[in-house]
Amino acid sequence: MRRIGKVVMAAGAALGLAIGIAVVVTYWPAPSPPRQQVEPAAPLRIDNVTVVDVDTGALSSDRSILIVDGKIAQITGADEISELSSLRRIDAAGQYVVPGYNNMHSHILTAAHPNAGLALMLSEGVTGFRQMNGSDRLLKLRREGRLPLNENTPRLLATPGDLVMPFNVASVADAETLVTSQKRQGADFIKVGATTPPLLYAILSAARKEAIPVVGHLPEGIDPVRASQSGFHSIEHLGPGDTMWIGCSAKKATLMKEAELNPSFAAPPFEIPTFAQKLLAPFVSRVMARRLLNPAAFEKEEGVRRLQAAFDSYEPQQCRALAQELARNGTWMVPTLVRLRTQYLQDSPEYRTDPSIPYLEPSAYSAWIKVADVFAALPESSRATFREGYDRSLALTAVLADEAVPMMTGTDGSHQAPGLSMKQEFQELARAGLSPLKILQMTTRDPARFPGRTATMGSVAVGKDADLVLLSENPTSDVANLGRIAGVVRSGHYHSRDDLELMRQRVARAHGRLE
């Protein structure tokens, strides 16, 4: 029984860290947006606004935007705009309009209280999101239009089915069955995590046959170049772990073999029957919930040593060559720097006073603090490696941007821990050296390019969905201005600054943080 318990823990760890991958854009199926319960909006007119071209950063001042049936109908001078009955007019003098923000790495729909998190996402300008963990049930709810999505929440852009992990995929045959089944249920992509190299490549092969993307973590022992060439299209969290660093190391072959033979999360040594998987899944999920809050807090010393060895043998030109290969193959990156920061710097005092704390569920924040205490008790040598890891993560993000690797903005947050807001992610991307315009593109234009939805989103243009953010300052001149939100339009519904603040206050009151 003790042996089985260890197997369950290992499988649970794989579940906890499974974070998806994606196949080359050509494998992405024709977009078919999920059903969402959005009430029709009355015609809306936004006057005297400056339109930001997210491709070039050019500004067009004194524009009027007419929105009808949730779409942008006209963009012109104020005296040329069509007059319609029941027209609501917003004077946006001095404001700038950009496409709605997209959080391309979120787990909000599987949070304990998704409604609160969805409201907070909209209040920070997010009008679209990619859900990064799913299930048969989530896909069924989406098919039936029963997800909690409406004009007061962001739009769901894509979601997977069950996570791919050793716990539920033990053979090549299983890989093919899982991919086929998830596509049939309506999954937009396959999400792969802490699995073995042979099973990863089996999933990629099956996904190519089924023309469905694969996205997420690079499992330990995987060569990033080979994964990219095989169709691994969207790498989350810069790897995570040591995979990308081993790819940049002069000791690449040695460290890669070591990582494959000694993974942080081992696969079960035998196949677990389907009925047992279903019985054990809730238990595994509960057992691993604590570890999920910060895998670094529970990293074995051997894993930390390997990460440090990769840092110590870092070859700048080899890393640039790796980035160039990713760009050549169209492999995307979603850095989620705020997630890496809370992992590697979890003992930072700022997380005890973070401004987002009033909006966090008290029980979730309490659990996070307990794990922070575990992290703080790690050997100083381990925490020193992790501190170096975050600085290197910023530098790697800059290399990826310099070499034109396509990137998108995401936080990995469901408002269950401090420091995971879009505004903070913008600031960390700027610390990595990215320009305000580049960050704006990663948040608006590029999430439209990723799934091939540029016809409906990603720019402020006639015919596009009316998902917009109004800003009080020029977003191309200072990254801080991306967070100075004056209003949000979601599918033609206008939410003023006061409306958004009221949303935040309601969440805080629901959590007992405000009287």
Image: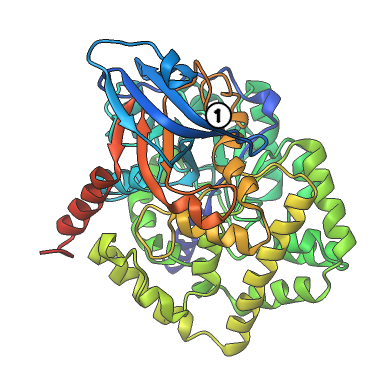
**Residue in the picture at 65% in, 55% down:** 239
Image-quadrant location for residue 368: bottom left
Residue 66 figure quarter = top left
Q: Which residue is under mark 1?
A: 459
- Type of residue at label 1? Ser
**200 above or below 290?**
above
- State whether residue 332 is above or below residue 182: below
Q: What is the quadrant of the C terminus in the image?
A: bottom left
The answer to whether residue 59 is left or right of residue 25 is left
Query: Number of numbered discs present?
Result: 1
Q: Is residue 405 left or right of residue 51?
A: right
Residue found 55% across the figure and 30% down from its top: 458
Is residue 285 among what the camera can see?
Answer: yes
Q: Nearer the viewer, residue 367 or 479?
A: 479
Q: Is residue 452 above or below residue 362?
A: above
Q: Position of residue 345 (x, y in %)?
A: 52, 75
Q: Quadrant of residue 514?
A: bottom left
Residue 58 drawn at (x, y percent): 63, 36
Q: How is the image coloured?
A: rainbow
- Residue 323 in the image, given as x and y percentages of width and height: 80, 50
Indicate left or right for 444 with 202 as reference. left
